[in-house]
Structure formats: structure tokens, C-alpha cells
Amino acid sequence: MSATAGFRRALKSGLRAAGMLDLARVGVQLSSLVLDLRRLPSTVTSLPWFVRCWRQYEALGGPALRMRDVQPCLDDRGDSAGSASGHYFHQDLWAARKVHDSGVAEHVDVGSRVDGFVAHVAAFTEVVYVDLRPLEAKGHAHIKARVGTVLALPFDDLSVRSLSCLHVIEHVGLGRYGDPLDPDGSRKALAELQRVVAVGGDLYLGVPIGRERVCFNAHRVLSPRTVLGALDKLTLLEFSAVDDAGDLVRDARPDDFERADYGCGLFHFTRR
């Protein structure tokens, strides 16, 4: 029996025992469940709890529950409040704080996470968001989307006062997002970011760092020294990093992360 078939049988048996199953409705209700095979054992063992809750809720005088409206959430009660660690958590807050403290009236971001960093920054300043894919941010006047690519930014040389690119350049040239294959994609992206930074301007860069390699076609991992060498016309103001354990290390030494497995380098550059 396949794992999915086992899941279906367990769900069917549990709901039948509760008097709530019409066999014709099983297929419809399964569409509301996420069949993640890694969580299948906990999903199956949670079914009796789900059935008990259903029956108890109705016994307490709640409105009758309909099968077509059911959306089983079987694991949330055992989850933590969240995770205040990892690349995106530390990176987005690190860069957003820097943009805030700089006091700029407009910030340009290239391809970073919209529901993380971009949303943080749009709360206090204008954000011009550049991405290969169009973005609709209806109802949020502080976000102005422009279609573009990190390999050909729609800005003149030395024209951008505040610029960020977080967890983006490692993907360039691997085809993951429909872009052309290019083994030099990350290097070319760094050169383009460097081109547009204004004199006195700031570049906030986040990128996987450590033992340099290509994890095709997900991403690259770059040596910190590779990043520094590619941005040789800019001055490094700060290097911090997220280590392999997911913790933030402030004012780190690039050499200490040369052999990391999958860290995240947080680089703050300026043009003198």
C-alpha cells in the first residue's frame, strides 16, 4: 500500500467511526489536506484527535460542521511560536535597520523577499522594487515596482543612493527562475550592482557563503573573498554573518567563514 493510500484509508476510517463520512465526499475533502509524506506519520496519528475535537465542538452547541468546509490543521498545536533564526530572519532585519538608520527617502531593492525585507522597509520609506517578474502591490503606495534584471539594472552609473540585494545573486545563471544559463551569473550580477551605487551610497548584500560550490540548480555558495574581490571599487563598512547554526554573528571576520557549510554573508558597502 502506498503512503498516500494509507493516509486515505486512515482518514476514511476515522471519519466513518464518527458518523461523518459519506464515501462520495472523501475525495473532495482530501483536496484540502497537504499530503507531505515527511509529515504523514504525525498526520495519521492526529486523526483520532481531530475526530474527537469535531464531535466535542458540535456537542458544545456549535453550529453543524459541513464536510465541504473542513480544513484539517493537524500539526499546529505542537508547533513552536516561530523561529527567530536562520538566513532570512537575521538578514532582513539587519538590512532593514540599516536602511532605517540611514534616513533615506527612497531605497532601491533588487529581487529580495517581498513579504519580508521589502515589507519591512516600505513601512518607513519609499521602495523601488526591481525584479524580472512583475509585482502588483495594490494599496501600498510606498512600493513602486519596476521590471528589470540584476544583470541590466534600469539605472544610470553611480545613480543609486541606497541599494539592496538579499539572497538573489546566488541564483543568477542557473535557470531556476527561467533566466538564461550562465556560469558567470553571480559575478556579473555583482558587477552590475557595483556599477549603479552612487558616491556616498550604500549597498546591502546578502548571499550564501562558505565552501564555494554550485548546488545546481538551486543556488551557489560563494567564498566571502570572492564577493569582496568582485566589489573591489567599493569599501566594506561591515561584514556580519549567519552561521551554520542559524545564529547572527555581528562584525565577523570574512576568513572565519571561508569553510562554512551554508552561512549567509551580510555585507555593507559604500562608494568613497
Image (spheres, grey):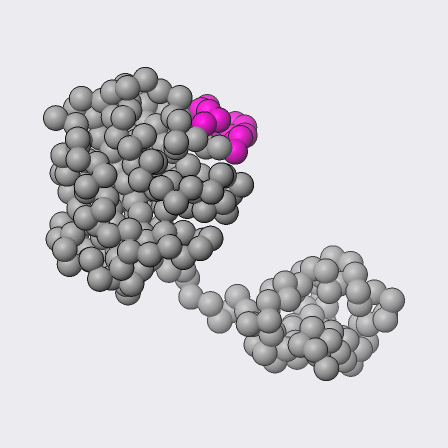
147 drawn magenta:
yes
- Is residue 236 or residue 174 the one in the foreground? 174
- Is residue 17 or residue 269 the one in the foreground? 269
- Is residue 72 or residue 184 the one in the foreground? 184
Q: Is residue 238 left or right of residue 68?
A: left
Q: Is residue 12 left or right of residue 216?
A: right
Location of residue 196 (image quadrant): top left
Image quadrant occupied by the N terminus? bottom right
Picture coordinates of residue 235, whole percent (x, y): 14, 34
Residue at 53% in and 30% down: 134
**Residue 49, above or below 235:** below
Number of residue marks: 0
Residue at 85% in and 70% down: 22
| Residue 125 seen in the current view | no
Q: Is residue 230 left or right of residue 124?
A: left
**Residue 269, above or below 44:** above
Residue at 22% in and 22% down: 198
Location of residue 195 (image quadrant): top left
Residue at 33% in and 36% down: 188
**Residue 226, above or below 158:** below
| Residue 150 seen in the current view | yes
Picture coordinates of residue 265, whole percent (x, y): 25, 50
270 drawn magenta:
no
Region of the chain picked out in magenta, as a range: 133-148
Picture coordinates of residue 157, whole percent (x, y): 28, 19
Picture coordinates of residue 214, whole percent (x, y): 37, 55
